[in-house]
Image (spheres, rainbow, N blue to C red):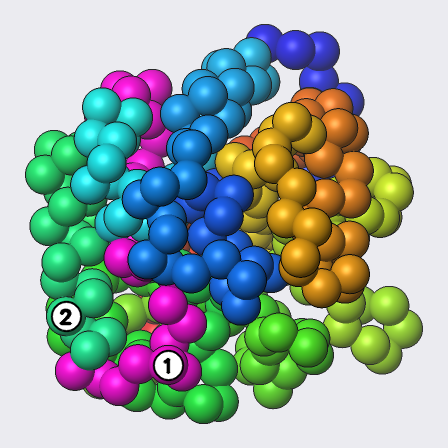
Amino acid sequence: MAESRITSLSASIVNGLSVDVEEWFQVGAFENVIERCDWNYIASRIEGNVARILDLFEWADAKATFFTLGWVARRHPRLIRRIVDAGHEIASHGYDHARLFTLDPECFAQDLAQTRRMLEDASGQPVLGYRAPSFSIDQRTPWAHAVLAEQGYAYSSSVAPVVHDHYGWPEAPRFAFRPLADSNFIEIPVTTAMLGSRRVAAGGGGFFRVLPYGFSRWAIHQVNQREGRPAVFYFHPWEIDPDQPRVENAPLRSRFRHYTNLDKMAGKLGELLRDFRWGRMDAIAAREHELLQEKAA
């Protein structure tokens, strides 16, 4: 394992590491310029990118959860098996990255069922976790948690408890909670930190790429040390791929968010993996379930 810089205060806490497995052309930033009907004709880069991530995780002795699109699993079943064989968890990211507020409860249930079949067929393991595309469980989709519980999911990591122009549920709790009174189903929000009295996004993705690494290190230390809680971090395979095609007709803001610091991402991930302990989201969910049981007792 790489030389560790984990501090004694953070050494006992295992944080949740997650990868949202989708192609570079399936992101929300390009949804208005790349049509779904064209996806089958665009060159895939997912296998090479995930292979690099698996190598990085092996180097760091880190385990993770791969929230995977059914669309990807259907086309790359051997990739799903490779992820599982390396000791990581496969969980659902929905079929084709449709945001939940574009669906109704019935369509969402169908999306969950077909994606789960594809992921379980490819992985040979039960799928217990879910992450909504673009963190789209929010005040517009109050029915989503009930549908997930009815479908037999144990946990979700689909809430971003911040203000953002593309997503966000700022009134939601910052840490794991039970959204349903009659169920043990758990929602585990992506990490935020407190900057004075203001919540700030600190769980990965574009914020991690654009901002200096020191910000993320400070934020995770805050969550681990001051709050005594695990952080939840996410990123995408395309974020370590500086050679991916450029979508020149996308809006300037979308291009900035998507392409900034792609060449630095792998190095920053290496620092993150070295500085903190990381594990699968199903293990985080199990520990949070125990903590919530203790609080309720």
97 within the magenta span = yes
Instruction: Tell me how far mark 2 sits from mark 1, CA to CA.
Output: 14 Å
Quarter assignment of residue 268: top right
Specify whether 125 is left or right of 266.
Answer: left
| Image coordinates for residue 40, horizontal then vertical, percent | 31, 44
Q: Which residue is mark 2?
A: 110
Specify whether 43 is left or right of 146.
Answer: right
Residue bounds of the magenta highlight:
81-106
- Residue under the image location 63 percent in, 48 percent down: 247
The front one of 34 and 6 is 34
Q: Which residue is mark 1?
A: 102
The front one of 115 and 59 is 115
Specify whether 154 is left or right of 224.
Answer: left
Element under label 1? helix
- Residue under the image location 72 percent in, 35 percent down: 262
The crowd level at tag 1 (other Cα within 10 Å; few <14, some 14-19, many 20+) is few
User: Which mark is in front, 2 or 1?
Assistant: 1
Q: Quadrant of the C terminus?
A: bottom left
Task: Please state which amino acid type lies under the numbered disc 2.
Answer: Gln
Q: Which mark is residue 152?
A: none
Task: Please state which amino acid type lies under the numbered disc 1.
Answer: Thr
- Residue under the image location 10 percent in, 39 percent down: 121
230 within the magenta span = no
Residue 63 showing in the rendered view: no
- Residue under the image location 46 percent in, 52 percent down: 26
What count of labels does the image hold? Answer: 2
Quarter assignment of residue 280: top left
The front one of 27 and 149 is 27
